[in-house]
Image (spheres, rainbow, N blue to C red):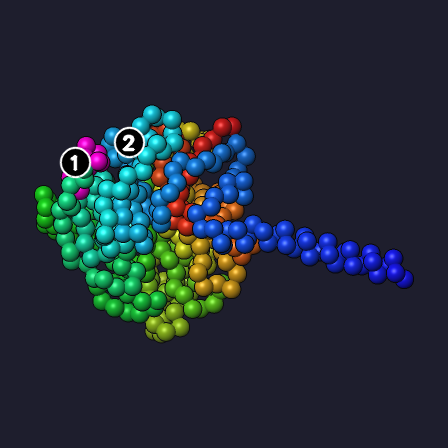
Amino acid sequence: MWPFKYLNSLRRQAAVITSALALTFAASASAKKGDIYLDKLNLPQGFKIEVYAKDIPNARHMVRGDKGTLFVGSMGEGKVYAVVDSDGDQRADEVKVIAEGLTRPTGVAFKDGDLYVSAVTSILRFDDIESRLDNPPAPVTITSQFPDKHHGWKYIAFGPDGWLYVPIGAPCNICDEKDYANIQRLKIDGDKVTATETWAEGVRNTVGFTWHPVTKHLWFTDNGRDMLGDDIPPCELNTAPVAGKHFGYPYCHGGDILDPEFGNGKNCSNYVPPVQKLGPHVAPLGVKFYTGGQFPEAYKNQVFIAEHGSWNRSQKIGYRVTQVTLDENGRATGYKPFIDGWLQGEEVWGRPVDVLVMPDGALLVSDDYAGAIYRVTYEG
């Protein structure tokens, strides 16, 4: 009997060792925020991912200047960064802080040589910034009209019409508050906002939008409400080709789920349904159409979404970059992971925030957990 007991003991020890090894990565990932594990990432065949820049704490949204500088906002740091590739080797040579002490300056936009930054209540402008990276100017305050409420941080971008699009997130998880949960656009003339228009309503919390490269229609992600369980409602990818449409919040979610608190007497058919239902609680943020020439033709004008990942689901979901495939009429025909692996079991080492197509066709991905920017290329 002794040999049998000894064998069982060895098996138990082996199981313990195997479990310990399986947890080694998870423990290191949770204990060492900022570590990067590219070998854990999964991409389609022929694609490669590298670190473009690191040591950018809480790296959020990105925009590229006319001279090639990559500007990156941050969430908790209060800083705005300029990432410089001075030798053109497609890897950052220097990361400069061009602003600090701001309130959640997550959103960045660029127009006519000037950098625009969202700071919750305010939109700031840094004039002629690419010529002054080592001696940044004091910001010009364009407006301070926005409320400091829940979901107050903002993605911002200039549309094809030249107006600055700015979201106002719901000041809660679920509530019916006037003048919130919308996307506005601002006409800026000099240092002033000369006109404001609400473009879309019923938008709970969009933290990413873009314009179709052919139709020039606005597309945006929207984060679904919490506390209805693990699997409902879905997050959303929507399009708003014209102003004045209502996308359902807080009455209807995902195009067909009436809210248990605010949906009484409402009909989901009265609201615009999403182009694509995304995973529940995946927290979709940045979204871009692929307009480069480096990836295979099948990716042309298709949608990439940075899914930041769930925070209150019993089993985590998201933490990936996904692709929504569209047909020639703009109808979604598929939704699948493009890059995953930032989530290992229930442990997280990275959280994608934004995506950006570069002039050479590479795709940049920002990660506010690892404090990094990745560069995705196709090598065939």
**Residue nearest the viewer, comparing 180 with 74:** 74
CB contact under 8 Å: marks 2 and 1: no
In the image, residue 112 lies in the stretch drawn in magenta: no
Q: Nearer the viewer, residue 369 or 361?
A: 369
Q: Which mark is residue 168?
A: none
**Residue at the location (52% across, 32% down)?**
46
Q: CA distance from mark 2 to mark 1?
A: 13 Å
Mark 2 element type: loop
Q: Answer few, some or many: residues within 10 Å of disc 2's Cα (few below 14, many 20 plus, some between 14 and 19).
A: some
Left or right, 145 with respect to 353, comes to: left
Q: Secondary structure at mark 1?
A: loop
Is 229 or 121 nearer to us in this picture?
A: 121
Q: Amino acid at mark 2?
A: Gly
Check disc 1: other Cα within 10 Å, few if <14, some if 14-19, many if 20+.
Answer: some
User: Where is residue 218 drawn, in percent x and y?
Assistant: 29, 46
Looking at the rendered structure, the kind of residue marked 1 is Asp
| Residue 127 is one of the magenta-drawn residues | yes
Q: Quadrant where the N terminus lies? A: bottom right
At which x and y percent is residue 236? 39, 55
| Residue at x-position 29% and y-position 46% | 73
Name the residue: 36% across, 62% down: 269
Task: Work out whether 82 lies above or below 142.
Answer: above
Placement of 205 over or under 289, stated as above or below: below
Q: In the picture provided, is 350 more to the left or to the right than 16?
A: left
Tell me which numbered mark, 2 or 1, is placed earlier along the sequence: 2
Q: Give the residues in magenta.
A: 126-134
Q: Residue at x 56, y 50 (%)?
A: 25
**Residue beneath disc 2:** 68
Q: Which residue is mark 1?
A: 128
Residue 315 shown left or right of residue 291 in the figure = right
* Left or right of 11, for residue 317: left
